[in-house]
């Protein structure tokens, strides 16, 4: 028994050291991770826009794509992503336009605030006919407050250490120790990934909190709705067709119930605006197998096949509803 | 079922518990459990092909019994040839039908005759080359009266289908494995722990070394037209480690798993990349196949008896057949022939049995001569692996032509430093352990060893978890 306990302790200690080493030196990173550029891709459209030399032809068809790594194509080559597939489909189609342009200003890690900023940064310069937002449930995470500077901390005394001696209980000490352990974090993260792949979620986990933000109408979802409403109203006023594609987590296609709380809230919000074409990925991919569309078991980013399929979904909407195809 | 899959992670403990805690009082039941488990293991891939194994089992079991009761040489020979024809007939049909047909058509076309024949969409049953050779060894040994035929059908079925080594070896001899099914197995904790260690080492070789090497090797082989000679050489080296990690990793898991159930399988790899010449390499690489060919092909052909021309002919036959065994493609045949050519100078100078002992025995480092011998042998085998890995002979030739160009001295465009460091550490660890059956074999009970053993084991587990290339990648040798 003693020996077994000793072995378990040694295993945990070795794990703690290895995880810390791996984190500090990102050893073997190159062979395991497909690196994602965090910048907007320098497409011909983007370069023309940067140089202020975009042709002003009223008969051109212009599409602007917004979103995070899911639509940007995290883990796959840019040429295979959503916007490039859509561009190929539009170029191959016969529409009432001289030339088509697809400006992809999606960016990994972008949330609803970033998307709003990107939208207003480019909308007047690019003058799109169609705007596509690749929506992801985690778009309500991160900073969503529009301020001149977001770096300042609120001056309310919080975070300032109080004077006097601090007594920490034994439980507190253990908690601190556990909280500081990379090993524990690693095991929890992996366990949660594994549980999610079986359709379960740990209450209180980041994922659980994100989903609850929607179903319980928490502050970050309220703020997101405000940000999205600004885009929607601007698009409405300027006769821009707005398409929102709520991307599915492709590694959990068989367990859509994990996201139903969030998806219901997202759908209800967008359906308030008749001008918005809302595409629900959880419905469009219903009955499909995750292994056909995911990057990996623990990564919900769509693979090349999924990007192509989603581009086709959007292309069909454009073809059916946009005046350039009437 | 794959050894590196979640299915096997559940399957193994269930069978282990049933074997040692439920069926442990009855040998027949234990053997029956092995048969059932083996059929489930194989059927997990495609249950339809279970009928092939069962048919081979019935044929060889019946022929074995018939051989015992037949004393006329002519009839005995007929029985032997029936077994050979049935087993090799299956193998030939499933593995080589399309190859022969395509080459037959090409040959006729070359001579100006157009013939048409349809190739078949044949699925190659996993492991057919392995279990076919295993059952054949039984019939041949019974025919040669090297062993008594068994009357116990369940034991014989367990021998043919024993799940740890069913799909990718080691190719067991009936004389070694079959008698183990007749004896009562007693649980040996030390043996089981050693088995677990060997499984762990096999998983490390497969998931960390082989599957990560595969990422680079695949990338380089897919783009060989655009890459420098040095990168292509590195591609060959990555493939050399991929195939070693993949196949020897499988063998380690198989041997380790068998040990958990109280069985001893033959050793299949003995640190082949530390060989000083090609002859030594072939005594250390896929030992169960090399010795099978030696015992059942080379020796019956006359072996090293007779003149030098006989030896050369037999050497070429054995290497080419060995190449052909790996797959129905000219690349494998040339790979075999190339190894025979490498072997030839040693044979002619009678130096093919020079390096029988382990390299640098009782020394930490090899001598300079040994170092260069090992390096040269490794380079030669790597060149041969390029044929093995290529889709066709043309590709292999082009790959080598690109490789042996001036750009061989350029800095490689694919050079993953971290991973190369890991491979070097792997080589050092294998070098230190080269006198052991596997690197995680802890024989001595030195003072303080109780601490360093779990640390080493933990380290390997964490390396697999953190740096392994997961995704249930198949073992290369499944296709053979």
Image (cartoon, coloured by chain):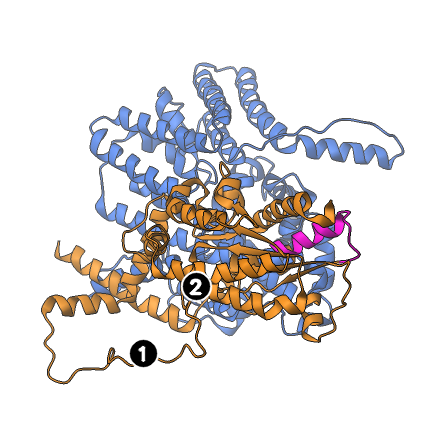
Give the letter of the blue chain: B
Q: Is residue B192 left or right of residue A111?
A: left
- Which callout, 2 or 1, points to the residue nearer the camera? 1
Examine the structure image and report whether residue A240 is included in the region drawn in magenta.
no
Q: Mark 1 points at which residue?
A: A154
Residues drawn in magenta: A81-99
Single out the residue that lies furthest toward the bottom: A163
> What's the mark number on residue B426?
2
What is the x, y in percent for residue A43? Answer: 67, 66
Q: How many marks?
A: 2
Is any atom of residue B274 visible in this view? no
Residue B248 rendering spot, x and y as whole percentages: 46, 50
The quadrant of the rendering that contains the C terminus of chain A is: top right
Nearer the observer, B218 or A78: A78
Residue at 56% across, 70% down: A39
B1 lies above or below A118: above
The image position of residue A12, as x and y in percent, is 25, 62
Which element type, helix, strand or loop, lies under badge 1? Answer: loop
- Above or below residue A296? Residue A169 is below
Quarter assignment of residue A45: bottom right
A34 relative position to B150: left or right = right
Q: Which chain is orange?
A: A
Secondary structure of residue under mark 2: helix
Please identify the residue farthest to the right as the structure is shown: B112
Of B227 and A278, nearer the camera is: A278
Q: Mark 2 lies on which chain?
A: B
**Which of these two is toward me, B402 or B74?**
B402
- Work out whether residue B364 or residue B18 is closer to the camera in this orientation and state it: B18
Pointer 1 chain: A
């Amino acid at each position: 028994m003693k020996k077994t306990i000793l072995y378990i302790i040694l295993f945990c200690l070795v794990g703690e050291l290895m995880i810390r080493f791996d984190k500090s030196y990102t050893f073997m990173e190159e062979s395991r991770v497909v690196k994602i550029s965090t910048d907007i891709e320098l497409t011909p459209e983007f370069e023309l826009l940067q140089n202020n030399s975009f042709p002003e032809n009223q008969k051109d068809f212009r599409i602007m794509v917004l979103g995070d790594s899911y639509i940007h194509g995290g883990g796959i080559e840019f040429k295979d992503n959503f916007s490039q597939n859509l561009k190929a489909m539009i170029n191959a189609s016969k529409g009432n336009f001289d030339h088509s342009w697809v400006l992809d200003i999606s960016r990994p890690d972008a949330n609803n605030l970033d998307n709003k900023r990107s939208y207003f940064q480019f909308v007047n310069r690019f003058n799109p006919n169609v705007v596509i937002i690749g929506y992801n449930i985690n778009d309500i995470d991160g900073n969503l407050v529009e301020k001149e500077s977001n770096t300042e901390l609120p001056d309310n005394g919080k975070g300032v250490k109080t004077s006097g001696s601090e007594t920490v209980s034994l439980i507190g000490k253990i908690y601190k120790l556990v909280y500081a352990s990379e090993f524990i974090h690693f095991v929890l993260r992996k366990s949660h990934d594994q549980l999610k792949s079986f359709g379960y979620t740990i209450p209180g986990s980041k994922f659980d909190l994100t989903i609850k933000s929607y179903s319980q109408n928490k502050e970050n979802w309220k703020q997101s709705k405000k940000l999205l409403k600004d885009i929607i109203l601007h698009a409405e006023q300027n006769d821009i067709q707005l398409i929102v594609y709520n991307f599915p987590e492709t590694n959990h296609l068989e367990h859509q119930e994990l996201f139903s709380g969030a998806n219901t809230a997202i759908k209800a919000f967008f359906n308030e605006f008749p001008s918005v074409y809302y595409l629900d990925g959880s419905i469009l991919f219903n009955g499909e197998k995750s292994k056909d569309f995911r990057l990996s078991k623990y990564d919900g980013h769509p693979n090349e096949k999924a990007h192509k399929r989603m581009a086709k979904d959007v292309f069909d909407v454009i073809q059916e509803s946009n005046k350039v195809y009437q | 079922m794959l050894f590196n899959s979640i299915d096997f992670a559940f399957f193994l403990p269930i069978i282990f518990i049933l074997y040692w805690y439920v069926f442990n009082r009855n040998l027949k039941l234990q053997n029956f459990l092995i048969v059932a488990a083996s059929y489930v293991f194989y059927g997990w891939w495609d249950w339809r092909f279970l009928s092939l194994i069962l048919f081979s089992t019935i044929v060889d079991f019946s022929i074995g019994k018939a051989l015992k009761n037949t004393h006329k040489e002519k009839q005995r020979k007929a029985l032997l040839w029936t077994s050979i024809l049935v087993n090799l007939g299956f193998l030939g049909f499933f593995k080589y039908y399309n190859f022969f047909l395509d080459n037959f058509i090409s040959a006729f076309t070359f001579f100006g005759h157009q013939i048409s024949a349809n190739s078949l969409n044949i699925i190659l049953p996993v492991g057919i080359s392995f279990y076919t050779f295993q059952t054949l060894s039984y019939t041949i040994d019974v025919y040669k009266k090297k062993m008594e035929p068994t009357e116990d059908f369940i034991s014989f079925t367990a021998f043919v289908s024993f799940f740890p080594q069913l799909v990718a070896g080691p190719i067991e001899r009936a004389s070694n494995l079959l008698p183990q099914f007749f004896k009562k197995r007693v649980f040996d904790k030390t043996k089981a722990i050693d088995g677990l260690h060997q499984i762990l080492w096999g998983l490390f070789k497969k998931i960390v070394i082989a599957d990560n090497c595969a990422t680079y090797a695949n990338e380089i082989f897919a783009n060989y037209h655009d890459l420098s000679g040095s990168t292509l050489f590195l591609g060959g080296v990555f493939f050399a480690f991929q195939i070693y990690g993949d196949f020897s990793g499988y063998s380690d898991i198989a041997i380790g798993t068998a040990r958990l159930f109280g069985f001893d399988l033959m050793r299949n790899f003995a640190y082949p990349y530390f060989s000083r010449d090609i002859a030594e390499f072939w005594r250390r690489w896929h030992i169960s196949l090399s010795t099978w060919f030696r015992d059942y092909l080379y020796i019956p052909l006359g072996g090293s008896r007779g003149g030098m021309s006989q030896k050369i002919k037999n050497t070429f036959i054995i290497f080419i057949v060995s190449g052909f065994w790996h797959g129905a493609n000219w690349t494998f045949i040339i790979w075999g022939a190339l190894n025979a050519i490498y072997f030839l100078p040693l044979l002619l100078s009678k130096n093919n049995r020079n390096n029988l002992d382990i390299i640098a025995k009782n020394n930490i480092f090899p001598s300079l001569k040994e170092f260069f011998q090992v390096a040269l042998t490794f380079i030669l085998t790597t060149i041969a692996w390029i044929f093995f890995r290529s889709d066709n002979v043309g590709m292999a030739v082009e790959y080598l032509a690109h490789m042996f160009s001036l750009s061989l001295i350029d800095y490689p465009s694919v050079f993953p430093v971290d991973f190369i460091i890991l491979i070097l550490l792997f080589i050092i660890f294998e070098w230190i352990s080269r006198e052991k059956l596997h690197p995680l074999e802890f024989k001595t009970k030195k003072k303080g060893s109780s601490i360093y053993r779990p640390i080493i084991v933990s380290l390997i587990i964490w390396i697999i978890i953190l740096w392994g290339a997961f995704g249930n990648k198949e073992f290369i040798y499944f296709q053979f």
